[in-house]
Image (spheres, grey):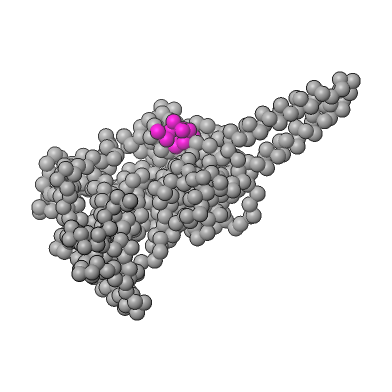
Amino acid sequence: KCKYNHDLKEILANRPEDIHGIDGYLNEEGCPAWRLRGYCDFGVMCRLGSCHINMSTGQNLRKTADECKSDASKDDDNNTETEASQPKVQLAIGHQNDIKNVISRDTMVKLRKSTYPFVCKRHFEVAKEKQKQKQKEDARVKEMNEEAPKAVDADREHLTATEAKSVGDATTPALPLKERKLIDFRNKVYIAPLTTVGNLPFRRIMKQFGADITCGEMALADQLLQGKASEWALVKRHPSEDVFGVQIAAGHADQYTRIAEVLTNEEGFEIDFVDMNLGCPIDLVCEKGAGASLMLREKKLRGSVEGLTKVLNCPVTIKMRTGWDEKKNFAHNLVPSIQKWGIEGIGAFMIHGRSRLQRYSRLADWDYIAQVASSQSSDYPKIPVIGNGDIFSYNDYEETILKRVGEGGDTDNMLLPTAMLGRGALIKPWLPTEIKERRHWDISATERLDMLKDFVRYGLEHYGSDQQGVNNTRRFLLEWLSFLHRYVPVGMLEVLPQQMNHRPPQNMCGRNDLETLMLSKNCADWIKISEMLLGPVPEDFQFVPKHKANSY
């Protein structure tokens, strides 16, 4: 017997009222699936379903093909009008294309059942094979006649060479060679991978404000190889993301290689580059040998880079920190070491100007980033370097990056004029526009609310319009608001520009009630903003930010 209610009349009678949002903006657009595709999979469970549910019979309506085309042309007309009137803030959603990089059900089942036909073997499997082969060799030698030592030595050498070759073949996938697509990172605004908050709806907002390159959230290789749907969701790509990368964190070379096999073999996957995470400071990640701890294991790192570059047909980028401890930085030694390996396919180094133990406290060390960019040898092909840390205005971009690019005519300096944004993009999503237009944008509270409305629309499209989809959208909205409140409007600053590590005064008041609400550090006020956009929350609802930063 099913535990869920199947009485349609009772479901309709108890169905909660549709969510409206402030000024009824959600009611005007209705269910995103109905508007974009002509059919909603959630039926009577949709929280915006009044537009596609026959309330008397409970029937879930479906649009004809002609109706869908007509609605799509109306959306295109609305886009043109919106772009002409407000090109920088609110862009209406065009006709929705399918999300890319969705892993097939068949592959997920094989990963979960450990039946995926990997070429690369796990490191412990290779170790076991070596041990078994050694035992066989010892047993065979023992059985040989002691009177023929030369024959024994020759046989031993032949056997060892054969076994070494077989083990090497097992760890290096023999996939067909493909043309590698190159990426030019110069003079681009690159949104760094941002755990939890750097989700697909947020990246759409960043594209709306002028970002050139986006990257998915950090995905753990062991979770991907187990077929965890929540982890594979992190590699999904929206059609608006024209240059898109995937970031992977792993502690073993075989994990990186196996993930590369899946990404390469999966049909329909479109990935422009794969980013290796050597910078995550979280204990749970570092204890697995991944993240920042992989910087300390050069042999594992080399095997990981070789495994990825041999399988993938896209560039591999390596994101790292300055070192483990700020007193003992070693990125300036690690980067030339990787360069001397002579591995083709490394697109760039991404250097975060802090050590692992610093996490996000104190200012990023841009002088050291410039030192790392000049540390490569002229005897080998040089690899571009992209710096990261504390870019919060166009002034920061020009003074910390452009000033150091080719400083003093230094031909050894490989630092690229790339604006790689992390927390700056979370606090000021319009930062790409400021950098490209070289201005300080005094964006109003109403314009920022319109931005949040767009995020909610994108969230309901991506996560679904049922109650679970609304909950997910609200959760990620609140996580983002835990960063957004740090922004102080330009018109209220005594000194321009605002710095990343500057904390606003307590109980700061804005120029109107909405701006004051957006400046609040109180979680209850963030929930009020979410209720303006997604309707009321249950009485016992509470929210605690996932990332409690002790630094700005």
Q: Is residue 367 above or below residue 481?
A: above
Which residue in the rendered view is the most extreme toward the front? 1
* 43 sits left or right of 401 in the view: left
Q: Foreground: 280 or 62?
A: 62
* 126 sits left or right of 428 in the view: right
Q: Which residues are magenta?
A: 284-294
Percent x, y of residue 550: 27, 34
In magenta stretch: residue 304? no
Residue at the (55%, 39%) spot, across then down: 253
Which residue in the rendered view is the most extreme toward the top? 146
Q: Please give the count of numbered marks on the rendered protein.
A: 0
Q: Foreground: 217 or 64?
A: 64
One can see residue 197 in this view:
yes
Residue at the (32%, 77%) spot, across then down: 67
Percent x, y of residue 348: 50, 47
One can see residue 430 in this view:
no
Residue at the (24%, 64%) spot, across then down: 49
* 17 sits left or right of 144 in the view: left
Q: Is residue 457 above or below residue 152?
A: below
Q: Is residue 484 above or below residue 18?
A: above
- Principal SS element in the magenta part? helix
Answer with the quarter of the image where residue 90 lies: bottom left
Q: Foreground: 110 or 59?
A: 59
Percent x, y of residue 409: 48, 47
Answer with the quarter of the image where residue 137 lies: top right
Q: Foreground: 241 or 499?
A: 241
Percent x, y of residue 482: 24, 44
Which quadrant is the C terminus positioned in? top left
Q: Is residue 14 above or below residue 65?
A: above
Residue at the (15%, 50%) spot, across then down: 528
